[in-house]
Amino acid sequence: MFIAMNRFTVSKGNAEAFEALWLGRDSHLKTMDGFVEFQMLKGPEGEDGTRLYASHTVWSSEDTFRAWTRSDAFRAAHKDAGGTAKLHEGAPTFEGFSVIQEIVADT
């Protein structure tokens, strides 16, 4: 498994628009081989009023994640990304993780 995350710092005045953007977008993720799950995470608010957000995507492998980043579906999902950069401060910070242990609840 591979986890891909992007962290965003969002000013208080842009939080509502940032959330609406993510909640309303067509991610195209479900069409991709190896896609497992996605969460958009809302983190703590800093003393300066900024809030941390993180997109959290789980893939069956790093190779399937890399295939996503080279796909037409990725380009379609990110076609308007340049216009939305004003909603967060600076570029998102990417972090990729290979899963070395997984513990799941008994069903």
Image (cartoon, grey):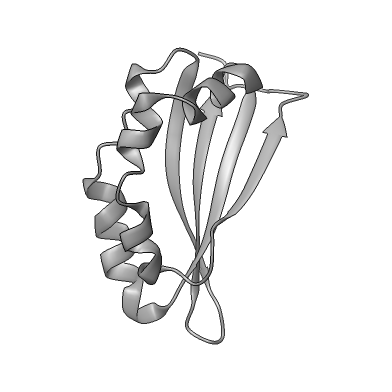
Along the line of sight, which residue is nearer the eye, 49 or 87? 87
Q: Residue furthest left?
A: 24
Position of the N terminus by quadrant? top right
Work out which residue is located at the far right of the displayed protein and give it. 100
Number of callouts: 0
Q: Quadrant of residue 99?
A: top right
User: Measuring 36% from the left and 26% from the top, which residue is drawn there?
Assistant: 72
**Is residue 93 left or right of 8 when viewed as pictured?**
right
Query: Would residue 45 be found to the left or right of residue 100 on screen?
Result: left
Residue 61 appears in the rendering: no
Coordinates of residue 10 in the picture (x, y in percent): 45, 71
Q: Quadrant of residue 21?
A: bottom left
Is 5 above or below relative to 106?
A: below
Above or below residue 6? Residue 16 is below
Which residue shows up at 49% across the image and 27% down it?
70
User: Is residue 25 left or right of 48 when viewed as pictured?
Assistant: left
Q: Image point 50% across, 13% down: which residue?
A: 107
| Residue 4 in view here | yes
- Residue 74 in the image: x percent, y percent? 40, 32
Residue 62's spot in the image, x, y percent? 64, 22
The picture quadrant where one finds residue 11 is bottom left
Percent position of residue 98, x then y: 72, 28
